[in-house]
Image (cartoon, helix red, strand yellow):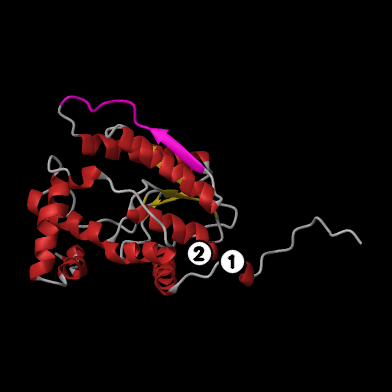
Amino acid sequence: MAESSKKRPKRPSDYPVPGAIGGQLIRTMLKAVRSTKLEIPVTSHILCACSGGADSTALALLVARYGRRLGSRVSLLHINHGWRGEESDGDEAFVLLLGKKLGIPVWVERLEEKPKKGESWEAHARDFRKVVFRRYSARLEGASIFTGHTADDQAETRLWRLFTGAPAKLGGGILMRHGVEVRPLLGVRRRDLISFLHEEKQIWREDSSNFDPRFLRARMRRDLMPVLEEIFPKAIESINSVDHSKS
């Protein structure tokens, strides 16, 4: 008898099983998604914004390889800002290969326009990302855009807003969910994501602009945060535990 061409439904044994670190991260990520009360239909799309850096590469692996309980189709979305020349092109090539490795589509957008006079590169890139995220969410019928923001990013943002007196609630942080964006790793330390990548034997790209002293956030990441943690080992957790909504 000829074998039926009809595919059987996948069983739990058909899916890869994460290691100890990956398993813990998946549980944390799923709990975070549930906390946003986000309902993701089985037929909907999840786009993982992926720069090729450690955080977003870990997010891509967690969602595409082990996040089957989200019950959704997964793609990667890469934005090539172009400001680092060959390095930026290398990031794009890396994400394309990562998508191929994971067996999922990759969407690429390139930032062609330069900032307007008086506008910083950081603000220009951030505004472009927001436009791209909204466009792809609409194009893919309400897709959720997952980003790899971590607890480290949260602490940096809170301190940056506190020290600069930035608009919005003074000292307030990044929201777990805002518009089409969902940040399921906001309670996870960057070092844990790197440990997960080592567990998976997965390489990632290093963005030199993350440590470029021309950018204030980069200087905070390079100079301020390590000193804070050296003096106060629980600095990140303490900064993020403060409830600014009641201040």
Taking the magenta stretch, the answer to whether it contains residue 200 is no
Q: What residue type is labelled 1?
A: Tyr
Amino acid carrying label 2: it is: Tyr
Residue at image position (18%, 66%) is 236
Label 1: state its secondary structure. loop
Nearest to the observer: residue 34 or residue 53? 53
Q: Mark 2 points at which residue?
A: 66
Is mark 1 in CB contact (under 8 Å) with mark 2? yes
**Which percent across, then down, holds residue 207?**
27, 45
Task: Judge by depth and name the residue closer to the eye, 224 or 238.
Answer: 224
Q: Is residue 115 magenta?
A: yes
The image position of residue 239, as x and y in percent, is 16, 66
Q: Residue 168 carries which label?
A: none
Residue lying at the far bottom of the rendered structure:
20
Question: Which residue carries the number 1 mark?
Answer: 15
Q: Give the range drawn in magenta.
A: 106-117
- Quadrant in which the C terminus is drawn: bottom left
